[in-house]
Image (tube, rainbow, N blue to C red):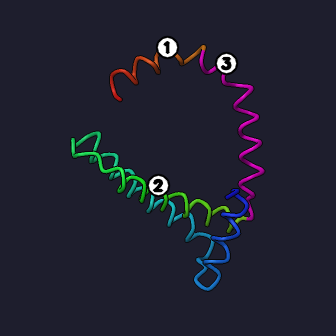
Amino acid sequence: MQLSEIQKFCKDLLLRVKYPRVGTIIGLQEELGKLAEVVMDLEIYGKPFDKSKLEKKCAEVFFSFVDLCNSYDVELDKISKNRIEEMKKKINKWEKEHGEILRDRRGKFD
């Protein structure tokens, strides 16, 4: 499914219970907080990794993000392609500036 198809599906699904636009950003923040809690439980408190719980929270964040984009008529296909092109231009610089330190940190934290 393309991002545009996901956006249309979500938009159609929520037609009868559409939040005010400000509610979409608040909802996204709420879902991000729940996702952060799952990651904190794993990384900070040493609880066992529950992939299904992480996947569920990621899906909720994604859905809330799509709802926010729909509320402001942001086309995810378009902005994703634009961002990828920007990243392609910057990746070599990022690797040169940050690659070694990030490899080191992954070794310590992952």
Q: Is residue 90 magenta?
A: yes
The answer to which of 33 and 11 lies nearer the viewer is 11
Dot 3 crowding, Cα within 10 Å, few <14, some 14–19, many 20+: few
Q: Is residue 103 magenta?
A: no
Q: Residue at x 55, y 63 (%)?
A: 63
Dot 1 crowding, Cα within 10 Å, few <14, some 14–19, many 20+: few
Q: Where residue 101 appears, x then y in whole percent?
A: 46, 16
Give the secondary structure at mark 1: helix
Q: Residue at x 35, y 50 (%)?
A: 51
Residue beneath disc 2: 58
Q: Residue at x 62, y 77 (%)?
A: 13
The amino acid type found where label 2 is placed reads Cys
Residue beneath disc 3: 92
* Span shown in magenta: 73-95
Q: Point out the image quarter for the N terminus.
A: bottom right
Q: Residue at x 30, y 50 (%)?
A: 50
Foreground label between 2 and 1:
2
Residue 74, image quadrant: bottom right
Q: Can you say whether 46 is above or below 66 in the image?
A: above
From mark 3 to mark 2, how far is it between C-alphas? Answer: 29 Å
Residue beneath disc 1: 100
From mark 2 to mark 1, how far is it between C-alphas? Answer: 29 Å
